[in-house]
């Protein structure tokens, strides 16, 4: 359709434009019918036997943050003191 007719039909709500996306999926280099578990760590046994050369390794994620450090806890006596203060604030 010409652009002018198409805009007229869209204005009158007689035309609905739909975008269809298609994908071509093909087998890649690493295609396999068996699910192989990737190794995450290199162990001394792998180095000693040389088996690490044939194993698939999981890529490292250098942008991962990791676990937060477990620090910043109150000393037990300071914890009791803060609890006592909380009790007196609730009573008073």
Image (cartoon, rainbow, N blue to C red):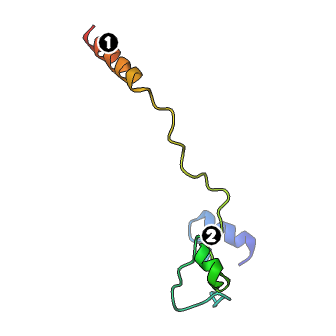
Compare residues 25 and 81 and report the one nearer the observer: 81
The label on residue 9 is 2
Position of residue 44 in the picture relative to residue 70 (left or right): right
Q: Quarter of the image holding residue 48?
A: bottom right
Of callouts 2 and 1, the N-terminal one: 2
Q: How many marks?
A: 2
Element carrying mark 1: helix
Quadrant in the picture for residue 82: top left
Q: Residues within 10 Å of mark 2 (few under 14, many from 20)?
A: few
Q: Quick check: 61 above or below 80?
A: below
The residue sitting at 62% across, 63% down in the picture is 11
Q: Position of residue 56 (x, y in %)?
A: 62, 81
Q: Is residue 13 above or below residue 65?
A: below
Point out the frontmost of discs 2 and 1: 1
| Numbered label attached to residue 3 | none
In the displayed structure, does residue 38 sit left or right of residue 47? left
Residue extending farthest to the top is 92
- In the displayed structure, does residue 33 sit left or right of residue 83? right
């Amino acid at each position: 359709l010409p652009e002018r007719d198409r805009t007229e039909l869209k204005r009158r709500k007689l035309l609905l434009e739909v975008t269809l996306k298609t994908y071509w999926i093909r087998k890649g280099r690493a295609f396999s019918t068996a699910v192989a578990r990737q190794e995450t760590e290199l162990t001394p046994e792998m180095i000693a036997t040389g088996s690490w050369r044939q194993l698939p390794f999981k890529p490292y994620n250098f942008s991962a943050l990791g676990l937060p450090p477990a620090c910043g806890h109150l000393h037990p006596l300071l914890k009791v003191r803060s609890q006592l203060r909380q009790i007196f604030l609730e009573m008073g």
